[in-house]
Image (cartoon, rainbow, N blue to C red):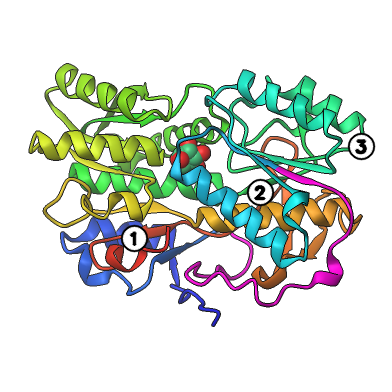
Amino acid sequence: MKRKVLSVLLSVSMLAAVLAGCGSKEAEAPAAPAQTEGDGAGETEAPAENEGGDADASAAGAGTFAIVTKASGNPYNEREASGFEEAMKAMGYSADQIIVRHPEAATADAQITVINELISQNVSAIAIAGNDNDALQPVCEQAASKGIKIISLDSTVNAASRLTHVNQAGTEIIGQTLMDAVLDLSGGEGQWAILSATSQASNQNAWIDAMKKVMEGDAYKGLELVEVAYGDDEYQKSVDQTQALLTNYPDLKVICAPTTVGIMAAAGVLQDKASEVKLTGLGLPSEMADYVGEDKVCPYMYLWNPIDVGRLGAYTSVALVNGDITGAAGEKFTAGDMGEYEIVEAADGGTEIIVGPPFAFTPENIEEWKTVY
Ligand code: RAM
């Protein structure tokens, strides 16, 4: 049975007011992950049941479709890839038409090696979560010159390197939502730090820029961003970076980690030390359930459904290969049971497709969602 997430008619600012206005966020928390209204495309579905039942095998054509994630060893990337595979199969493609590649490291070089191999394999399409916005352009252009349809998902490659980008949620809405969480958890003032992924990651860098822009507003003038640290989406490095932040900034009030690897590593450190520093950011409910709670290190956090990011990547790749879309703004297409999506202009001069708004994970709903992703 398809399950739809209840539409929660809260704008970002309303949500911020709710979160900031009182100490009892749990009172307002919805039963299912809250959606912040924003620049998302249409209705967002809960991911709990992967149907695949309405597979339209007749839609399947020839060709091979690849997904290249940021790196191996990250459960977020595995879920993204599982969504890609699931949607390809739902469209009737066979296992040997689907290629999943997790590069050895979250670097552009590792992805360039993988893309060169995929070019040799003569694949039809590549959906890539970019480890670098610009460094992949030559190899993407080479792939495109062979007729391979290139899209990015999760993390951009630049506009010249792709036909479109599957964006998990609008960049501004993520920046606004995370800044409002930092404001709330700091009590309105004080030092805070960001624990990011790699310094080249296009998605984290875009969210950090969006946060900095929001922070220019009057409401945030009591906040001092002391450092952006990089854990490279590696667990131990993220642990080390968290410890360094605690040592270097004894007055630190909040760490915001816009990476599932970073937030989980930071949560472990803060909990072990019984630290007073509060944590928020973007986390997988399955990894963060033990740390999300009113009296725990992470009162609440956000994410979207990584499985849906992969699924929409598959539907977009197939629509491009079939000639249903070209990647231009204004085009619409049906992404299987995810419904209709529209390609829109992206801030970087290219186009994008927004999966939906971010979800809030709170003590009230984390138990329900930890089994989903
Ligand atoms: C990590 C990765 C991924 C990002 C999430 C939030 O798993 O960096 O790209 O989207 O965090």
Mark 1 or mark 2: which comes first in sequence?
A: 2
Q: Which residue is mark 2?
A: 166
Residue drawn at x 28%, y 35% as measured from the top left: 265
Q: Is residue 90 left or right of residue 132?
A: right
Q: Is residue 54 left or right of residue 58?
A: left
Callout 3: CB less than 8 Å from ligand 1: no
Instruction: Find out whether the residues at labels 3 and 1 contact each other: C-beta distance under 8 Å.
Output: no
Q: Main secondary structure of the magenta part?
A: loop
For the residue pair 3 and 158, the one nearer the viewer reads as: 3
Q: CA distance from mark 1 to mark 2?
A: 24 Å
Considering the numbered disc 1 on the image, is that residue within a helix, a strand or a loop?
Answer: loop
Q: Is residue 133 above or below residue 148?
A: above
Q: Which residue is mark 3?
A: 147
Mark 3 or mark 2: which comes first in sequence?
A: 3
Crowding at mark 2 (Cα within 10 Å: few <14, some 14-19, many 20+): many
Considering the numbered disc 2 on the image, is that residue within a helix, a strand or a loop?
Answer: strand
Extreme residue in the bottom direction: 1
Residue type marked 3: Gly
Crowding at mark 1 (Cα within 10 Å: few <14, some 14-19, many 20+): some
Q: Is residue 343 visible?
A: no
Considering the numbered disc 3 on the image, is that residue within a helix, a strand or a loop?
Answer: loop
The quarter of the displayed image where residue 348 is located:
top right
Mark 3 or mark 1: which comes first in sequence?
A: 3
The quadrant the C terminus occupies is bottom left
Q: Which residue is mark 1?
A: 370
Stretch in magenta: 40-66
In the rendered image, residue 190, in percent from the top left (x then y), is placed at 19, 32
